Image (cartoon, rainbow, N blue to C red):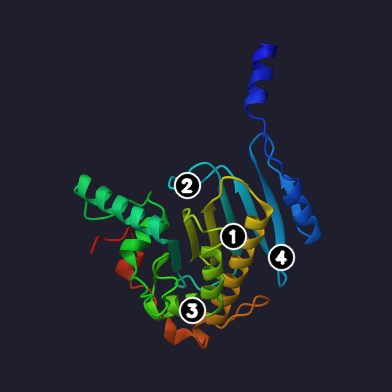
Amino acid sequence: MLESFKRLLKGRSDDHDYTAVEAWAKRRSFGFKRVRGETGFVVDGQLEGKPWRLEWGTPQRDYIVGHELRLRMELELPSDAQMLLLSRPLMDALERATFEEFTDNVQTQIGTKAPEEMRWLVMFPKVNLTTLKNLRVRFGAVATTHDAGLAWISGPLAHALEDAATGFLADEPPFVLMTLRGRAYLRMQLATPAVDDVAAALAVFEIAVAQVMLLTGESLGKARDWGHSSATTAWQSIQPDESSGPPKRR
C-alpha cells in the first residue's frame, strides 16, 4: 500500500520550472504560490488598487487542451456591460459546435450548461471589425451593443492585440477576452508558462481593463452609478425576454 501511495504522489508531481515566473512576480511585487497537489501556480496583483488574479494550470474550458492561462478582475461594471473577443479559429470552432448542438438535439434554445462564450455568439450582435484591418482576420467579437464593443477594441487595445498577434498569439491558440457579471476575464491555451508570454498576456489584460473602464465612464479606484455614466448612450439594457433563460437561436 505504501508503494501505491508513493506512485500516486509521483503521478501528481509538477515537473514544470516556475523559477522565472516567480522571480518576475517578485520583481513586480506580486504574490506567487504553487498549486498544491496539481500542476500550476497563482499570481496575485493589483491595478490601481484593485486586485486581479492570474492562474496557470488545468483548463476550465473544453476548448482548451493541455494547460490554461486565465486572468480575472472584479470591476463592479454594470451587469449589461458584456463584451467578448476571441481568436478567429476559436470563434469559428465555437460557432460550429453551437450549431451542431442546436441541430443534433432539435432544440430551439442553446443549453444553459454551455459556456457564455458559446451562448453569446448566438445572443449578441457581432462587432464589425472592418475598420481594424490588422485584427479582423485574427479575431472576432460580439457585444450587447455593436458600438460599445468596437469602442472597447479600437485604440490601445487594438494596438496591443496587433503586437500579440506577432508574439504570444502568433500560433493563434484559443484566446478569450470578456467582460461578464461586472468582471473582466482573459483565458488562453498556454502549454508552457514562459515568463515573457505570461507578462505579455497580463499587459494585454490590463489594457483591456483600462479601456472598458474608460468606456463605461468609471475609474478603477471608484465605480460610479451606471445610470449616470457618460457612456450610457453606447449601451442598451438587454430586454427581459433576452436576459431570462437561455438564448434562442436566430
Q: Are marks 4 and 3 in contact (CB under 8 Å)?
A: no
Label 2 or label 4, whichever comes before in sequence order: 4
Q: Can you give x and y, in whole percent of width and height, for residue 183 in the image?
A: 55, 65
Label 3 or label 2, whichever comes before in sequence order: 2
Q: Are marks 2 and 4 in contact (CB under 8 Å)?
A: no
Q: Which residue is mark 4?
A: 46
Q: Which residue is mark 2?
A: 64
Q: Who's the residue at 59% across and 58% down the image? A: 71
Badge 2 crowding class, 10 Å Cα cut-off, few under 14, some 14 to 19, many 20 or more, is many
Mark 4: secondary structure: strand
Q: Can you give x and y, in whole percent of width and height, for residue 249 in the image?
A: 24, 60
Placement of 192 over or under 108, stated as above or below: above
Mark 3: secondary structure: loop
Label 4 or label 1, whichever comes before in sequence order: 4
Mark 2 → mark 4, Cα distance in angstroms: 27 Å
Which quadrant of the figure contains the C terminus? bottom left
Q: Would you say residue 216 is visible in this rendering?
A: no
Mark 1: secondary structure: strand
Q: Which residue is mark 1?
A: 72
Label 2 or label 1, whichever comes before in sequence order: 2
Q: Amino acid at mark 2?
A: Ile
Q: Which residue is mark 3?
A: 154
Q: Are marks 2 and 1 in contact (CB under 8 Å)?
A: no
Q: Nearer the viewer, residue 98 or 156?
A: 156
